[in-house]
Amino acid sequence: MKTHLIRKETIEDYVVGHSGSRASFKDFLEKLKYADWEKPADIKATFSAADLLGRSCNRVVFDIAGNSYRMIAKYAFGERLVHLFICRIGTHAECTTLCNAARQYTVNHF
């Protein structure tokens, strides 16, 4: 299924203040345009450095620019589209601090 990115503007706004991430986010968006996902494991097939969070929380962390930046997103598989909602974009250090403080974004490899 094709992917519907909710609020692409969030990425566009972020790269304005973080110009070093521009090329990597452009690459991310290009891969996303051609993604064909049927199950969460397909996300990992498209973005090998992505981490699926928890067993059923429907969240994924994308490593951007060699893990200099991280984007936390929530996904929902529908009948015709996969909806990808951007929850947070930040530097690796910012997201690590958030994850440690909230204890809700635990990365599990399975």
Image: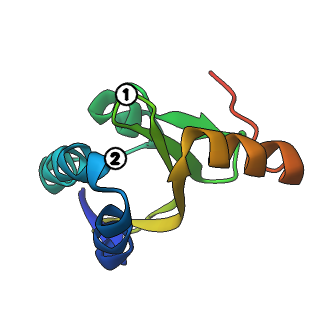
Kindly report which numbered mark, 1 or 2, lies closer to the viewer in this rendering: 1
Residue depicted at 31% across the width and 62% down the height: 15
The x and y percentages for residue 4 are 29, 69
Residue depicted at 23% across the width and 53% down the height: 22
Identify the amino acid type marked 2. Answer: Glu
Residue 23, relative to residue 2: is it above or below?
above
9 vs 96, left or right, is left
Residue depicted at 31% across the width and 78% down the height: 9
Q: Find residue 46 and name its label.
A: none
Rounded to the nearest angstrom, the CA distance separating label 1 from label 2 is 26 Å
Identify the amino acid type marked 1. Answer: Gly
Depth check, front residue: 20 or 56: 20
Q: Earlier in the sequence, mark 1 or mark 2?
A: 2
Element class at badge 2: loop
Depth check, front residue: 99 or 78: 99
The x and y percentages for residue 36 are 21, 47
**Within the image, what quadrant is residue 55 found in?**
top right
Pointer 1 residue? 66
86 vs 9, left or right, is right
The x and y percentages for residue 80 are 28, 68
Image quadrant holding the C terminus, namely: top right
Pointer 2 residue? 38
Residue 34, relative to residue 96: is it above or below?
below
Image quadrant holding the N terminus, namely: bottom left
Cβ atoms under marks 1 and 2 closer than 8 Å: no
The x and y percentages for residue 62 are 45, 42
102 vs 99, left or right, is right
> Within 10 angstroms of label 1, few (less than 14), some, or many (20 or more) residues?
few
Residue 45 can be seen in this image: yes
Element class at badge 1: loop
